Amino acid sequence: MSKYHISKNGYTLMKNGEPVQVGQVLTCFRGEAYTITGGNPPHKPSSQGKVWVTDGDWSQELYPSVFECKWVEGA
């Protein structure tokens, strides 16, 4: 796992008060494990942004709430 946390445009992706690291494996609400590869923070107040994930076979873009994460400004 990389030692770099996921930050962009003044936002940091957080889970349980801790920054999420590039390459960290998180489990979604369905119990499936995914590797976090990056993401985009919210572009407006009503948005929650997206995270980029892979399961080894394919990649996709999901909402951070799927992993109980959130983008925090200034964190």
Image (tube, rainbow, N blue to C red):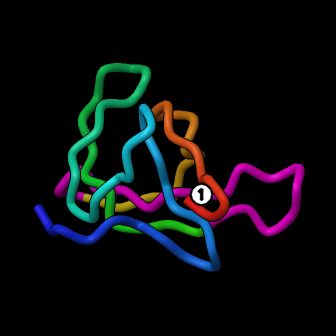
- Residue 1: give x, y in percent of width and height: 11, 61
Q: Quadrant of residue 65?
A: top right
Residue at 43 percent of width and 22 percent of height: 29
In terms of secondary structure, where does tag 1 sit?
Answer: strand
Q: Which residues are magenta?
A: 41-57
Q: Main secondary structure of the magenta part?
A: loop
Taking 27 as reference, is 46 left or right?
right
- In the picture of the structure, the residue carrying the numbered disc 1 is 50
- Residue 18: give x, y in percent of width and height: 37, 44
Taking 2 as reference, is 31 above or below it? above
- Residue 3: give x, y in percent of width and height: 17, 68
* Type of the residue with mark 1: Lys
Determine the residue located farthest toward the front in the rendered image.
74
Judge by depth and name the residue closer to the eye, 46 or 16.
16
Residue at 17 percent of width and 56 percent of height: 56
Residue at 49 percent of width and 55 percent of height: 13
Determine the residue located farthest toward the bottom in the rendered image.
9
Residue at 41 percent of width and 66 percent of height: 6
Taking 41 as reference, is 36 above or below it? above
Q: How packed is label 1: few (under 14 Cα within 10 Å), some, or many (20 or more)? A: many
